[in-house]
Amino acid sequence: MLQAYVKIFAIFALMFLGYFLSYKQWFSNRTADVFSKLVLNIALPFNMFLNMTANFSRDEFLTLFSGMIIPVISMTATFIISLLYRKLAKVTPSRQGTFTAMFTYSNTIFIGLPINLAIFGEKAVPYALLYYIVNTTFFWTLGIYEIAQDNPDIEKARITFHPLVLLKKIFTPALLGFIIGLLWVLTTFDVPQFITSFGGYLADLTTPLSMFVIGIIIYFSGLKNLKMNKDIFGVLLGRFVFSPVIVWLLGFVFPVPPLMLAVFMIQSSMPVQNSIAILARNYNADEEFGASSLGYSVLVYLVYIPILLKIIL
């Protein structure tokens, strides 16, 4: 348990370093954009491919995808609860869609993957990626649609999803790395040594750059600009209470390996998606609400994760 805490502290120390270097003006918002592109398009795909080929066997293939039912049902249930909650709690109408997106979907890559690696090791990667597949698919369909509903001119500019655009959002380089890794495992071929070495160097960039991005985002969002209100409190309930509890309950209905369920619980209880403020701005929704919810969810997570680990481990 202590070793897991030390590893998690080291990861969040990287986030604080990103915050500090932003304060020292080493990093800018542009730096966050560059780091995000490096992680999502280069480091993470290699990370996914190498982890799949090194830690996943063909015999585990059916076991992996049989567990997809839990994230699918849990996100559907959390989405429905968010609709009920925002009605009963009278969430501000101009931010209800953004509220639902943050209540339901988690940060499965920039924080989720490093945390799972720190706690469970590389054996957790296939399960973390499985949750990521479902989370990404739901977020870029229902999530984006809900955020778009907050646009005051939504009746004049209804959001439509072109199939090619949607496929591009879902089949990200990271997901493609995961899929190629799976296909490679099924062939039982060895990965060439050059790819292992070259890709390994790039894959190792995933965790530090991911946490730098979070630190940069929190700095430029401004800690002094974080304003707690009942709507943000509702988002935190969704992220840290409703979502993991639903996953835990589903574990009694759909038996899965203990490690898979533990990873799903960790992934389901991650902070808000780090891109939420940018998306809210793009769709003319409540950007300040998105940024404040992101900031609070990351800061609260520092206190929350030891409690969750105490329950799970």
Image (cartoon, helix red, strand yellow):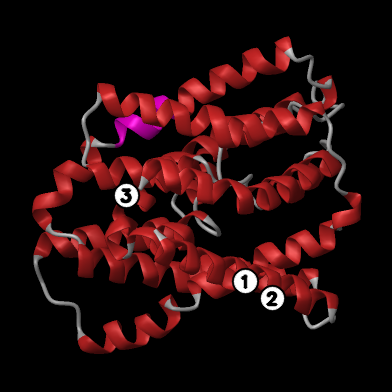
Q: Quadrant of residue 210?
A: bottom right
Which stretch did the figure color magenta?
Answer: 68-74
Q: Are marks 2 and 1 in contact (CB under 8 Å)?
A: yes
Task: Specify the quadrant of the image occupied by residue 179.
Answer: bottom left
Residue of label 2: 17
Residue 275 seen anywhere in this rendered image of the structure: no
Give the structural element (helix, strand or loop) at label 1.
helix
| Residue identified by numbered label 1 | 13
Q: Image quarter for residue 70?
A: top left
**Please, what is the three-letter code of the amino acid marked with disc 2?**
Leu
Circle 2 Cα neighbour tier, 10 Å, few/some/many (<14 / 14–19 / ≥20):
some
Front-most of residues 232 and 56: 232
The N terminus, quarter of image: bottom left
Give SS at disc 3: helix
Q: Main secondary structure of the magenta part?
A: helix
For marks 3 and 1, give the CA distance. Answer: 25 Å
- Asked if residue 204 shows in the view, the reply is yes
